[in-house]
Structure formats: structure tokens, C-alpha cells
């Protein structure tokens, strides 16, 4: 029989997220699956619910042996708590249309190769970057929703997977600014999840909405979510969806708006908590990570990454300044 430690470890590995364990529900799921693996406890339609340490574990009543399970659960919680503590927040490097040649792309990738980091290079550098990554994961900046066919200039989710991508950024404000609608974003999200890619869905309000106040911002974002996630059975994809809250006016400091600047950590923190609550109540999504993006740099990284509830950052410009980026990664690992 395998030990509970081995089972918790392999259960964590099999969860398809860089940083999988962010809430009680997830903890309960890992532990109950690990118990099934290590104790030969069979899952059944009739489940017995056991409360322990604030989490609920579901085991079959016939195989419920009080002392044995209590001990196993206690051990699993200790192992898992240590594991969670050792996991940093996730940092996604969106290189956009940079750098200008493969040599520099490889250099950047080698220096950014840490656990809990995702690198999203331009497509021509995919192969070279993938070759040098040992710890970081590869992500794409966009994709098309169809599998194949006469779609000049597009790339399919399956092609991305074959190239070694784990993640794909969808609905970035720079793509929306080029005409990508919520309907298109929705098709891409559906196709990516069905293919087994993990989605980083970017949402966020433009300056004119923010100027109207928080209620307008929440209305805007809830409409975006409803359209972008339409028709998805999110229960099955829950842990494959990462949200990046990127207020449009805070991206690339004033590129679209001469008054642009990064959001305040207070606002970002408030919005991230609100997004988590909204996703939970509207879509029953409990495990998705929510990141902040928009002019994250060395000066403000600590105040963003130190926020309660924030699961990481989507970094553009600063991910190209390698010394600065490495320091941001270090900050993410200690918060
Ligand atoms: P900046 O960090 O350059 O503002 O870019 C943010 C972004 O768009 C990440 O996707």
C-alpha cells in the first residue's frame, strides 16, 4: 500500500495547475483523492461526509474506519500545509511582440526559468524557448478556435499543445483593441479548454468605465464574464481557468490613454476579491486563480503580490527587463 505522503504528492502533481491549492475546497479534494489512493477507499454515489480541520472529506460509509482515517487525514493536512507554503504565487511573462531575435528570447527564457512562472513568447520563438525551459511553463499569447482549415495566419489550440504550450492567454485588452469581441473570446476559451490547454482569461474595464465608479466597473466586468464564459460547464474546467484582472487603462502605462497609470493595490485587491466572489456565486468556480496585470514592476510588485487573495501577476514590460523580472519572481515566492 502507498503511504499517505506519496499519495498527497502524486495527487498534487496530477492537479493540472502550476499553483493548485488555494482554497479549502481544493484542499479537501486533494486529501479525499489521496485517501482513496492510499487506503483503497472506494468512491461511491453514497458518500459519507467527514469534517476535519475546517474541510469536508467524502468517503464511503462502509470503509469509514474512524481512527485510521482521522490519523491519515491529520498527516495529509500537515504534508499539504507544508506543500502549500512552499508554493509561490504564479507569475506570467507576456513578452508581447518582443524581443527582436531568437538569441535574446533564449537568453531571457533561461534567466526566467523558475517554478510557478509561465513564459508567453511570440510564436516564432516557441521551439527555442521550449527547449531551454526546465521549470517554467510555456504559454501562448493567443490562438484561433478552429482545429484546422482555411484560416490564414491563425494557429490552432492543438498545434499549440503539440508545440509544448501549457497555457494560452485569451482576451488580452491589446487583442480586444484590435477588434476581438466577447463572442470571439468565448469561442477561444471553449476551444482551448476542450483541447486541454489552461486558459488565462484577461478581463478589465476601460478608463471611461472606471471614471464612472466601482458599480460601473463591476457591471462591465460581470457582463464580460457572462459573455466570455457562456455555455461552459465550468465545473469540469474550474481549475484550468486563470483570470487576469487587467484594467485596460493600467496596461503599458498610458499606451491607450495619456492619463494611464497602474491601479492602486487597494483597488486591485478589492476587485480581485470581488471577482472571486462573483465567479463563485455566478459560475460555482472556486479554484480559479485570479491575478493582477497592468504595469507591474519592481517598485510596486511587493504591494500587489502581498495582497490577500491575489494569486500572482501578469507582467508585460518588466518581464523583458531580466534583472527586474528575477526580483519580481523572488518577491512572488516570498509572498
Ligand atoms: P505591462 O506590464 O507592460 O503594463 O503589460 C501588462 C500586460 O498587458 C500583461 O499582459
Image (cartoon, helix red, strand yellow):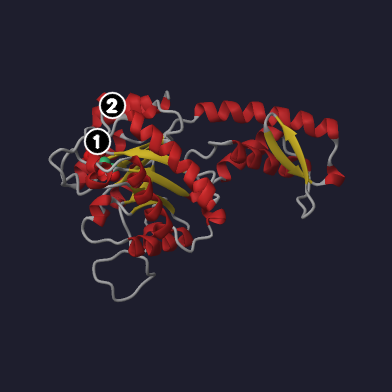
Q: Position of residue 239 (x, y in %)?
A: 52, 48
Q: Secondary structure at mark 2?
A: helix
Residue beneath the point at 33% across and 75% down: 149
Residue projecting furthest to the left = 258
Give neighbour class at mark 1: few <14, some 14-19, many 20+ (Cα, 10 Å): many
- Would residue 244 be visible to someone looking at this image? yes
Q: Which mark is residue 300?
A: 2
- Would residue 164 be visible to someone looking at this image? no
In the shown orientation, is residue 99 left or right of residue 118? left
Q: How many angstroms separate mark 1 from mark 2 (CA)?
A: 9 Å
Q: Which mark is residue 273?
A: none
Q: Position of residue 200 (x, y in %)?
A: 39, 49
Residue toward you, 260 or 193: 260
Query: Where is 239 relative to 320, above or below?
Result: below
Q: Which mark is residue 295?
A: 1
Callouts 1 and 2 close, C-beta under 8 Å: yes
Residue toward you, 103 or 8: 8
**Which image quarter holds the N terminus?**
top right
Query: Where is 79 relative to 7, above or below?
Result: above
Q: Position of residue 279 (x, y in %)?
A: 49, 47
In the shown orientation, is residue 46 left or right of residue 180? right
Query: Where is 129 relative to 112, above or below?
Result: below
Dot placed on the residue nearer the N-terminal end, 1 or 2: 1
Residue beneath the point at 24% across and 34% down: 262
Amino acid at each position: 500500500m502507498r503511504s499517505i505522503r506519496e499519495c498527497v504528492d502524486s495527487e498534487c502533481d496530477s492537479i493540472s495547475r502550476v499553483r493548485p491549492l488555494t482554497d479549502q475546497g481544493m484542499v479537501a479534494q486533494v486529501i479525499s483523492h489521496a485517501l482513496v489512493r492510499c487506503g483503497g477507499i472506494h468512491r461511491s454515489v453514497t458518500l459519507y461526509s467527514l469534517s476535519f480541520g475546517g474541510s469536508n472529506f467524502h468517503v464511503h460509509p462502509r470503509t469509514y474506519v474512524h481512527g485510521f482515517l482521522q490519523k491519515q487525514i491529520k498527516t495529509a493536512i500537515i504534508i499539504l500545509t507544508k506543500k502549500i507554503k512552499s508554493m509561490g504565487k504564479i507569475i506570467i511573462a507576456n513578452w508581447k511582440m518582443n524581443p527582436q531575435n531568437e538569441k535574446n528570447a533564449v537568453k531571457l527564457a533561461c534567466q526566467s526559468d523558475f517554478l510557478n512562472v509561465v513564459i508567453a513568447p511570440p510564436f516564432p520563438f516557441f521551439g527555442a524557448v521550449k527547449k531551454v525551459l526546465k521549470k517554467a511553463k510555456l504559454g501562448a499569447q493567443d490562438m484561433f478556435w478552429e482545429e484546422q482549415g482555411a484560416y490564414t495566419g491563425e494557429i490552432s489550440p492543438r498545434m499549440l499543445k503539440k508545440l509544448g504550450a501549457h497555457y494560452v492567454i485569451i482576451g488580452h485588452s491589446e487583442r480586444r483593441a484590435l477588434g476581438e469581441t466577447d463572442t470571439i473570446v468565448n469561442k477561444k476559451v471553449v476551444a482551448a479548454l476542450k483541447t486541454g490547454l489552461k486558459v488565462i482569461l484577461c478581463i478589465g474595464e476601460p478608463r471611461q468605465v472606471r471614471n464612472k465608479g466601482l458599480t460601473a466597473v463591476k457591471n462591465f466586468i460581470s457582463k464580460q464574464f457572462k459573455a466570455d464564459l457562456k455555455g461552459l460547464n465550468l465545473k469540469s474546467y474550474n481549475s484550468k481557468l486563470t483570470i487576469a484582472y487587467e484594467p485596460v487603462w493600467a496596461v503599458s502605462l498610458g499606451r491607450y490613454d495619456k492619463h494611464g497609470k497602474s491601479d492602486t493595490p487597494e483597488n486591485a485587491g478589492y476587485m480581485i476579491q470581488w471577482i472571486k466572489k462573483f465567479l463563485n456565486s455566478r459560475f460555482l468556480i472556486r479554484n480559479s486563480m485570479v491575478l493582477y496585470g497592468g504595469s507591474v514592476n519592481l517598485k510596486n510588485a511587493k504591494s500587489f503580490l502581498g495582497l490577500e487573495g491575489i494569486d500572482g501577476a501578469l507582467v508585460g514590460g518588466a518581464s523583458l527587463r531580466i534583472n527586474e523580472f528575477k526580483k519580481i519572481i523572488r518577491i512572488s515566492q516570498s509572498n
